[in-house]
Every structure is written in structure tokens, then in C-alpha cells.
Amino acid sequence: MSSGGAPPSPTMVPLRPLPDEAYRRMAAVLRIGLFASLAILVSGVIAYLITHGSEPYGNAVSSNPILNYLSLSGLLSGLAGGHVEAYLTLGLLVLVATPILRVASGFYYFGRGGERWMAGITFAVLVLLLLGVLVLGPLIR
């Protein structure tokens, strides 16, 4: 027989789940970004094959066709000029930006909902993603 009752339980942080609308909006960011990048990339690949289909395969592999469009000014002038490679670059940028926007929206909703720990973790992930894309990416280009 026990003489003191139940052992004390560790203190738990009460969970405050986000509203369903927040999860729907965060999922919509992923869906919209994925389908937008997919549409841009598929259209770009088809246009690239139509315009450069007669070139040997080695030409596209040996030279990076999107290298000239990795700066904002190069991308904008390439899009304005109708260069297929600029549209391929845009599709890749949308694809890379999609999870970054999803994490940013998670940070917003967790912060708004009072979930400090989750907002902090999400912010750390967002900083690491941005460092990888904006700092480390240009260094290894």
C-alpha cells in the first residue's frame, strides 16, 4: 500500500494548437508555390526543347544556360526579352522560395498564436534557410 498518493507529474506546457485556418493557409503556400513552379518549369522545358532541340545534348550540359539570369537585373531583362532560360530560372527560384515562404508563414502564425517555443524554432529554421540561399549559395556559385 502506498501512503502518499500519486507521484508528482512534471510540469507541462499547455498546448495551444493553431487555428485550422492557419494550417490551411500554410498548406496553401506550399500548394500554390509547387504548382506555380511546376507550370513555369514545364512550360520552360517545352519551350527550351522547341528552341534548342536540334542542339547536341552536350551543349546544354557543358554550359549553364541559366547562369546569366541569376541576378535580378539579368532575370528581369531576360524575362522582358522572352529568353527561355530566364523562365527556367524563374521556375527554379519559385521552387526554392516556396519552402522559405512556408517557414516564414509558420513563424508568423506561431508568433501570433503565442507559441513562443515554436516561433523561436521556426525563426531559427528560417534564418538557416536564408543563410543557405543568400550567403552560402553565392559563395559556391
Image (cartoon, rainbow, N blue to C red):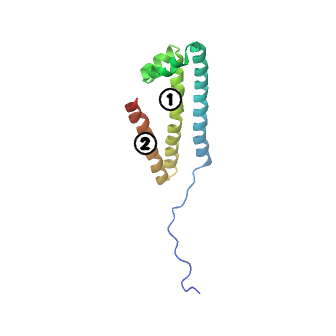
Q: Where is residue 54 drawn, in percent x and y?
A: 58, 12
In which quarter of the view is residue 4 placed?
A: bottom right
Circle 2 is placed at which residue position?
Answer: 128
Question: Hey, what amino acid is under mark 1?
Answer: Leu
For the residues labelled 1 and 2, say whether their Cβ atoms are less than 8 Å apart.
no
Looking at the image, residue 123 sits to the left or right of residue 38; the answer is left
Q: Earlier in the sequence, mark 1 or mark 2?
A: 1
Q: Quadrant of the C terminus?
A: top left
In which quarter of the view is residue 73 placed?
A: top left
- Closer to us: 11 or 135: 135
Q: Which mark is residue 93?
A: 1
> How many numbered markers are drawn?
2
Residue appearing at x 52%, y 50% in the figure: 113
Residue appearing at x 57%, y 54% in the figure: 17
Question: Hey, what amino acid is under mark 2?
Answer: Leu
Residue appearing at x 57%, y 85% in the figure: 2
